[in-house]
Amino acid sequence: MMTPDERFFGRVKKNAPNGCWLWKGPVNSRGYGLLGYGGRNKTILVHRYSYQRTREIPDGQQVLHKCGEKLCVNPKHLFAGDALASANNRRRLGTQPSGEQNGHARMTEDKVDEIRRLFAAGQHRVKAIARLFRFTESGVREIVNGVTWKITYGKYKDELEAVRKKLYHRLGPKEIDEIRRLYAAGGITQKGLAAQFEVSSNTVWQIVRKRRADVRP
Ligand SMILES: [Zn+2]
């Protein structure tokens, strides 16, 4: 019975210590290598296996390729990151169109999908996504709320609504009263309240003006 390490190294072609080590074993439908691991018919993505031989993969993070070669398992070419890091990496490698040369980012269906996917993953707020895509916050908000690009909204509708619901429920009537009370008492700015309650300054602005009691992402 071979150990996972023996199976791993038996199917890796090392070009040079610092070059890509290419996986010669089976791959999945997305082109990533698979290694038999942890029991009958069970597999692990081989680049994740390679990474975790020497380092722990932080919870919920992906293992990404600095080199852009999906089949590379050289641990020096791998790093862990979240969905935003993954999107950044793809942009850096040029595997995703950037198209902002003139400063006016043009949206494409791919980018819209990516924006919705990032937002639906629940880790990234509109502001961070807008910065990444060099697009306006209001533009991103319209995309994640399905105001624009309605045609493809259905694909991520459930996830997006779940995230919005989570954000919405962050502030109950009690917190909203508390925000109004603290603001009326003075000594704290709207910006300070926004930081304290983890909502946007715009949300606080609307709450203190009693415009609305709900929360926008
Ligand atoms: Zn590589």
Image (cartoon, rainbow, N blue to C red):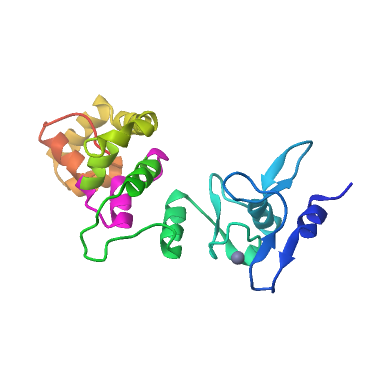
Image coordinates of residue 127 in percent, x first then y, are 28, 50
* Horizontal arrangement in the rendering, residue 40 relative to residue 171 (left or right): right
Q: Residue at x 76, y 40 (%)?
A: 38
- Viewer-closest of 13 and 138: 13
Image coordinates for residue 37, horizontal then vertical, percent:
75, 44
Magenta segment includes 132: yes
Please tell me which residue lies in front, 151 or 172.
151
Locate ligand 1 by image quadrant.
bottom right
Is residue 133 at least partly visible in the picture?
yes
Q: Which residue is at the far right?
A: 1
- 91 vs 152: above or below: below
Q: Is residue 132 left or right of residue 61?
A: left
Does 142 appear in magenta? no
Residues in magenta, as a range = 120-138
Q: Closest to the observer: 162 or 184?
A: 162
User: Residue 77 at x, y = what percent?
Assistant: 59, 65
What residue is rendered at 14% in x and 37% in y?
A: 206
Rendered residue at 26%/66% (across/down) = 101
Report the label total: 0
- The quarter of the displayed image where residue 132 is located: bottom left
Residue 188 visible in the snapshot: no
Where does residue 147 sit, x and y in percent of width and height?
A: 21, 36
Instruction: State the quadrant of the C terminus.
Output: top left
- Tell me what residue is drawn at x 45 percent, y 49 percent: 83
